[in-house]
Image (spheres, rainbow, N blue to C red):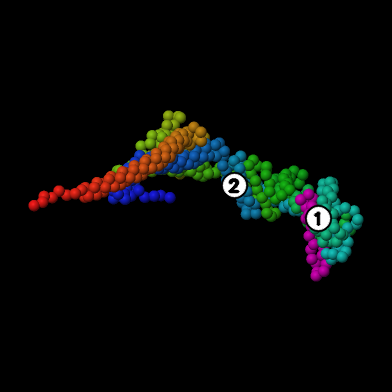
Amino acid sequence: MSSSVDGLVSGLDTTTLISKLMQAEAVPQNQLRTRVGTQTTKVSAYQTVNTKMSAVQAAADALAKPDAWTSTNVTSSTTSVSASTTGGALPGTVTFDVTQLASAYSSYSQEKLPLTGSTITNGTPISITKNGVPVPLTTQPADGSLQSVVAAINASSDKTGVRANAIAVNGTDYQLQLTSTTTGAASQFQVTGLTLTPLQLAPAQDAKILLGGTGFDALYATSATNTFTGIAAGLTFTASKVESGVSLSVSKDNGSVADKMQAMVDAMNAGKAQIDMASSWDATSKKGGPLSGNSTVRQINMALTGTVTGLTDPTKTLSQIGVQVDRSGKVIFDRQKFLDAYTAKPGDTQALAADFATRVSAVAKGASDSTTGTLTTAIAGTNTLIKTLNASIADWDDRLQVRQATLKKTYSALEVALGKMKDQANWLAGQIASLPSNSSKN
């Protein structure tokens, strides 16, 4: 509980007086708090620039990788065959006929029977055989009814690869349908342990395409699914119906490379713009950004600009592939000029752009590396300073608390001293008043 020391004797407003004195005493601590705020803002600015530099490095690395230059497009002559390519695909055309689609083996029982009340098991465990290998059900039916058999087969479908269903044929009777969970010739199966007579609903077959030739010289390729890989390097396609005269044309995807170049240039400009904003100086308000005059970010900005001009081969210029720097320091990318250069001289263009990307990546990594990056080091150093300042602020809390207690004690002692003096003055005045007066008698 706080207590007032306002002057009962002196009449002084000592509470206000001490408050004013403490405000003056706290000036150095407030200055420390201001410095903490400034340094915290600086750390935030460093971190924002650091994030931008990480993005620059990621974009540059994406362009520098060899597989960035092997991107391809594939065009299908029909909507019934969809196709895609990977980086290893080679330009060219593949033609074929889709002669057969893959299907899963499926059969149903000739007999029609109710779900319960009749027995369809023959007293031996139900087993499903694929490729000559019998696989017993994990759990055999609770009874021999159709409903129980369906439940038992489905409970083991992950192991057997076969699903069961009871197909209604009228209000009371059903047929047992069994279907493989996979497609292809290997999906065919046989079931033992049942008394039913199976009828085939769909054969087990692979998808098949004719690549060329006729008769004995015909060249076919098959797949257990309707998706084919390995027909040509890096090419994958899926057929959805039987069709003749299918053509898949693979071509280089120059636009993808241009996109990666644009992404790197955009990341560079975003990083440079962030540095400019953080280190700007407003001549009107006479105020600077949190990193105004900061040599660390200024050098990063200059280094990014230098990657455009400081090529490994002095006989080359990035303007040959559409990259240059304008007067404001912004990196400009001419996409069409790049595509024209890449079409005319793909090897030279790749070498020049990859060298550019490698140097940009080195600058960005030098700034944002999690251990040795200049921004990382600057952030760590500033955080250390903030920690030291906060420790000093805490010390000032203790010092000011002691000072406030001292002032309260001093003014309390003053009041006591003044009270004693007042008591003495009152006593003295009383004594003087009690003295007999000397008067002359006539």
Q: Quick one: which residue is furthest to the right in this view?
A: 123
Q: Label 2 belongs to which residue?
A: 74
Q: Quick one: which residue is furthest to the front in this view?
A: 442
Cα gap from disc 2 to disc 1, whole angstroms: 43 Å
Which residue is at a point 84% across and 46% down the rendered structure image? 133
| 177 in magenta | no
Which residue is at a point 61% across and 44% down the rendered structure image? 85
> Quick one: 147 or 341, which is closer to the camera?
147
Residue 438 in picture, x, y percent from top left: 15, 48
> Quick one: 331 or 138, which is closer to the camera?
138
In the rendered image, is residue 204 in sight? no
Residue 351 in picture, x, y percent from top left: 50, 34
Residue interval drawn in magenta = 152-175
Residue 320 in picture, x, y percent from top left: 43, 37
Which residue is at a point 84% across and 50% down the rendered structure image? 136
Helix, strand or loop under label 1 = helix
Q: Quick one: which residue is furthest to the bottom in this view?
A: 171
Badge 2 crowding class, 10 Å Cα cut-off, few under 14, some 14 to 19, many 20 or more, is many
Q: Label 1 belongs to which residue?
A: 153
Residue 94 in picture, x, y percent from top left: 64, 45
- Above or below, 248 against 200 in this view is above
Amino acid type at image mark 2: Val
Which residue is at a point 46% across and 39% down the rendered structure image? 50
| 155 in magenta | yes
Q: Earlier in the sequence, mark 2 or mark 1?
A: 2
In the rendered image, is residue 376 in sight? yes
Amino acid type at image mark 1: Ile
Position of 26 compared to 88: left or right? Answer: left
Location of residue 305 (image quadrant) = top left
Helix, strand or loop under label 2 = strand
